[in-house]
Image: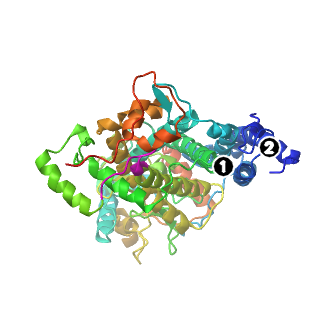
Amino acid sequence: MNASAPVARGLSRWLPALLLLAAVAGSFAALLAMRNDEGARAWYGGRVGGSTLYELNLAFARLLPFAAVAGVALALLQRRRLHTPTAATAGAVQRHELTVVVTHWLNAVGLGLALVTAAWLLRWFGNPISLEATYALHFAGSLLTVGAVAHHLTFHLAGGGVGLVPRSWRDIRNAMAELVSYTGVYRGRRGILSVQLPLAARRPAQRALRRLHLAPDPAGKYLAVERVVSYPVWSLLIGVVVVTGAIKALYYLYPYPSGFRQFATFLHDGATIFIVIFLAAHVGSIVLVPRHWPLLRSMITTRIERRYVEQHLPRWVDALPAGGEEDGHRAHRPAAPREE
Amino acid sequence: VPDETADASSGPGRLDRRDFLGQLGAAATAVVIGGLGVPGLLKGPAFPSVAEATGVIFPEPSLCIGCLTCEVVCSDIHRDAGLSEMPRIRIYDLDTVEVRPEIIRNYGDRGQFFPEPCLQCPDPPCLAVCPVDAFYVEDGTGARVIDADRCIACGKCEQACAFAALDEQLATNDGRFGQRSRITYDPQLNAYTKCDLCYFREEGPVCVERCPVNVRIRQGLLESDVLCLDLPSTDPPIFAALQRQQTERAPATANARS
């Protein structure tokens, strides 16, 4: 960028704040617009649109664009953090930006709300609360998710953070090997519930896996399975539910041919089922595999123990700032999982 | 607002071109998305405009003998058509109904009853709130119909229905379906269902055809100026009269249409 572009710098400086302001103002305007609806038409008994449910739909449809704008604006305001070097101390290094952690959990809460209420709406379980409250929670969760997704996309695409994108076929092979490692077949990589297969079982299994070239390479900042399985699948599923949900919601303001909404509903519900399945796998792969617990901690505290990085994410070590050696151990680079 | 000129990789005071373009692209996208939301603030709700039904089930409570034939034949005919077998019309015991003397003369004192059908609203709230387009307006009759295959049984239509059902404890039929409005949940299909005016029958609604009081009136064995269950063509006065009858209920006297 030419240094003599004060307009560009001014735009870059003020546009995010203006966007955020517009998103807040738009949200207020959306709620105020509900008051105008009351005079729009008295449906039987004076009930606007027949019911509170209709009003909730309208409110959601109106708020939706502004939730996305707010996510984009907040991400633009925070984008400089991506350029901050990874903070490190002798004992721990920062694995995630704070904003990434916050976005992850906002997404979790939003998606959780939307999923639980979807399960009630689809009658997978009995609904203990009113239908109005169910839809209000469903929409609140959806707005959170939309905002978090918009933030995530902007923060990483506009900021250049693409560490979770798969880079090579080798990543795919490593991801498959990582999944296989959950069986405890590799020495030094305990599997689900810390299981390690007995040597007699490991040897023939490892021979077979070697023929398939399935032996995980040392990992970098992100595990191959995170880059190849977790992130792309989550992106796809959340992308589908967000886009189809938006299509369904906007019908209440901008009616379009009904067949389109039926198709959107089909995709929305289908993706929801896959999300439930994938969420179980996502949580299971963390909770049931003890060697992944530090990864969960890092998604809460942003930091991860340097010792863990050296042992499990050795390719990341070179990229880390020196953290001193006060804790009495040197960085080492273990090879691929040991085979017998 | 952070000073982005300070964090650019190209050095202090300079803004990295790729970074700037990325930010600009994101901001432009946000402006477009926000712009799409603005018209929604200015316009009112987009109510679906649907054709009116050609007819509507119009009961005359003072002629009802509570025989439940309408409920039974409704259930049977729909089951035979491969649809939900829930009755689309319900009969309730309601002691405020004045029974006509000729009914008591012909049938004895059987009690007082109040039929509750779907009103096939001109602007159906049930249709408008359905999140999955399970509702459609049937071409031939204009009936507001729920497609059970599409229905996700969320219950919005049942709740949006402007015409509450009487307390189900008063239902003449022993069956308890948890019915709260003119739309009924069918646990077997996990779908909601409502009166479809028997659109699949050339003869029209089976309840109107088989009601024993109607049969007697048509045969001239019972004197009445109206049918127990009638199918007048819908027009504003008819709908207004039916709405009044079905919301006020008492006193539901002879010929609510007058």
Q: In this rendering, does residue B228 appear at all?
A: no
| Up/down of A11 relative to A93, above or below | below
Residue A100 percent coordinates (x, y): 55, 38
Amino acid type of disc 2? Arg
Magenta part of the chain: A214-226
What residue sits right under mark 2 in the picture? B14
What residue sits right under mark 1 in the picture? A158
Q: Nearer the viewer, residue B142 or A171?
A: A171
Residue A274 percent coordinates (x, y): 39, 54
User: What kind of element bears circle 2?
Assistant: loop
| Chain at tag 2 | B
Disc 2 packing (10 Å; few <14; some 14–19; many ≥20): some
Q: Are marks 2 and 1 in contact (CB under 8 Å)?
A: no
Q: Residue furthest left?
A: A200
Question: Are labels 2 and 1 on one chain?
Answer: no
Q: Residue furthest top?
A: A326
User: What kind of element bears circle 1?
Assistant: helix
